[in-house]
Image (cartoon, helix red, strand yellow):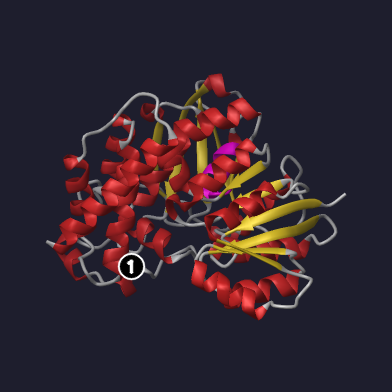
């Protein structure tokens, strides 16, 4: 019997790779719905090639254009807006929802998928960064297991054996394109330079986050919620080869690592078939070819975003939503040549310092309000 899936964010990097994984396993997987923010050209192409009966477009104008293109078609139903995405999530025969949209836009669909008791494959770290407590509480209440797609968290998920015996989680990262750049030279970094990641092919936002090391910071917060491990027992290390994706250290001093070539199709496929493992079309890891695995500590002076993320996580409450929102606006401004690379952490720090943090049990409205406040605050600081 085929597993029916919905892919939210099908036109992005993860979504495109997910559809390729589906093509390898046509006898086992069927895509019932796909969604995008506004890239209707690719969305239409994906729907027709993969025979997808439902599509959703978040941007209302783009959705209207796609509906006009599909007018008279009985094969594809086009939905629009956030409500359209939620309709895809609610499709009755769907077994698994891949959350591959970028940013906090993943939070509401994730909560809806959990409330519908669908299995969730989560490729969106911002959802847990901003709303981790809320999401995991809902997942526990509804008996929903969240399968991480992020390569680092998929690695930890695969390495975990006895949670009670865990000493620490070790999240690896390549260090980005500026790992060896002297601090005084970082003023000249351009968006074009920052988008050249040394080992991974990813979307623009996550590639910039990797360059600033904010990605590692967000992953620490995500890991805290996914695995219930305190921040003092989660660390990040730089591993330039990107072969070991993360490690779990146990109290008996043994360490288990998950390894593989840096290819997101591996954790995507793992999430689609968990707990089974399937063969695929990817090349096997050749340790002789790899030859060398090296590690180093992250430089928190040149890359303060990692420190800011850990601070926000330890403060908790609405501070992580503020961190995430300020970072999204800062990255957007950097890509638009409005601020410098070094101004990204400066802007985030300023927004965090201005925030009156609410702690304790939060509801969805409070998280979204903190997100809106931080975005407005960051934009005002950019435009001053």
- Residue 27, given in percent of the width and then of the height, sits at 85, 59
Place residue 120 in its image quadrant. top right
Residue 92 covered by magenta stretch: no
For mark 1, what is the residue? 194
**Magenta extent:** 149-157
- Quadrant location of the C terminus in the rendered image: bottom left
Q: Nearer the viewer, residue 262 or 286?
A: 262
Mark 1, secondary structure of its residue: helix
Please indicate whether residue 76 sits to the left or right of residue 265 in the image: right
Q: Nearer the viewer, residue 169 or 345?
A: 345
Seen in the picture, residue 51 relative to 128 is either above or below; the reply is: below
Please indicate whether residue 383 sits to the left or right of residue 373 in the image: left
Q: Residue at x 17, y 40 (%)?
A: 353
- Residue 6, given in percent of the width and then of the height, sits at 68, 55
Please indicate whether residue 283 sits to the left or right of residue 342 in the image: right
Q: Nearer the viewer, residue 55 or 287?
A: 55
- Residue 332, given in percent of the width and then of the height, sits at 32, 64
Seen in the picture, residue 233 relative to 340 is either above or below; the reply is: above
User: Which SS does the magenta portion mostly show?
Assistant: helix
Residue 298 seen anywhere in this rendered image of the structure: no
Please indicate whether residue 120 sits to the left or right of residue 135 in the image: right
- Residue 116, given in percent of the width and then of the height, sits at 66, 39
Count neighbours of disc 1 (C-alpha within 10 A) and say few if under 14, some if 14 to 19, many if 20 or more: many
Q: Nearer the viewer, residue 144 or 117?
A: 117
Query: Furthest residue to the right?
Result: 1
């Amino acid at each position: 019997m085929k597993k029916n899936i919905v892919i939210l964010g099908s036109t992005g990097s993860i979504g495109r790779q997910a559809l390729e994984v589906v093509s390898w396993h046509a006898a086992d997987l069927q895509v019932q719905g796909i969604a995008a923010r506004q890239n209707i050209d690719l969305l239409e192409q994906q729907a027709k090639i993969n025979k997808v009966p439902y599509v959703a477009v978040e941007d209302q104008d783009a959705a209207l254009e796609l509906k006009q293109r599909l007018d008279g078609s009985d094969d594809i139903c086009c939905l629009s807006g956030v409500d359209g995405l939620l309709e895809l999530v609610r499709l009755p025969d769907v077994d698994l929802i891949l959350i591959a949209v970028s940013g906090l836009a993943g939070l509401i669909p994730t909560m809806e998928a959990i409330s519908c008791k669908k299995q969730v494959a989560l490729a969106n770290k911002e959802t847990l960064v901003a709303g981790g407590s809320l999401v995991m509480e809902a997942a526990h209440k509804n008996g929903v297991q969240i399968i991480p797609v992020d390569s680092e968290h998929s690695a930890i998920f695969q390495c975990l054996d006895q949670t009670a015996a865990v000493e620490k989680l070790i999240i690896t990262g390549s260090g980005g394109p500026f790992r060896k750049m002297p601090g005084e030279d970082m003023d000249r970094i351009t968006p074009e330079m920052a988008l050249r990641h040394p080992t991974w092919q990813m979307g623009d936002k996550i590639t910039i986050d990797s360059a600033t090391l904010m990605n590692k910071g967000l992953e620490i917060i995500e890991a805290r919620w996914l695995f219930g491990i305190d921040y003092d027992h989660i660390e990040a290390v730089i591993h330039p080869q990107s072969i070991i994706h993360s490690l779990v250290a146990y109290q008996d001093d043994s360490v288990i690592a998950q390894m593989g070539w840096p290819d997101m199709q591996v954790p995507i496929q793992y999430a689609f078939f968990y707990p089974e493992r399937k063969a695929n079309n990817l090349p096997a890891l050749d340790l002789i070819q790899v030859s060398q695995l090296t590690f180093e500590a992250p430089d928190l002076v040149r890359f303060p975003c990692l420190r800011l993320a850990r601070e926000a996580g330890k403060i908790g409450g609405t501070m992580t939503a503020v961190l995430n929102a300020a970072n999204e606006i800062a990255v957007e401004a950097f890509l638009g040549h409005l601020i410098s690379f070094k101004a990204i952490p400066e802007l985030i720090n300023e927004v965090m310092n201005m925030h009156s943090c609410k702690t304790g049990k939060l509801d969805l409205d409070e998280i979204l309000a903190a997100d809106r406040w931080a975005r407005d605050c960051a934009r005002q600081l950019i435009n001053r």
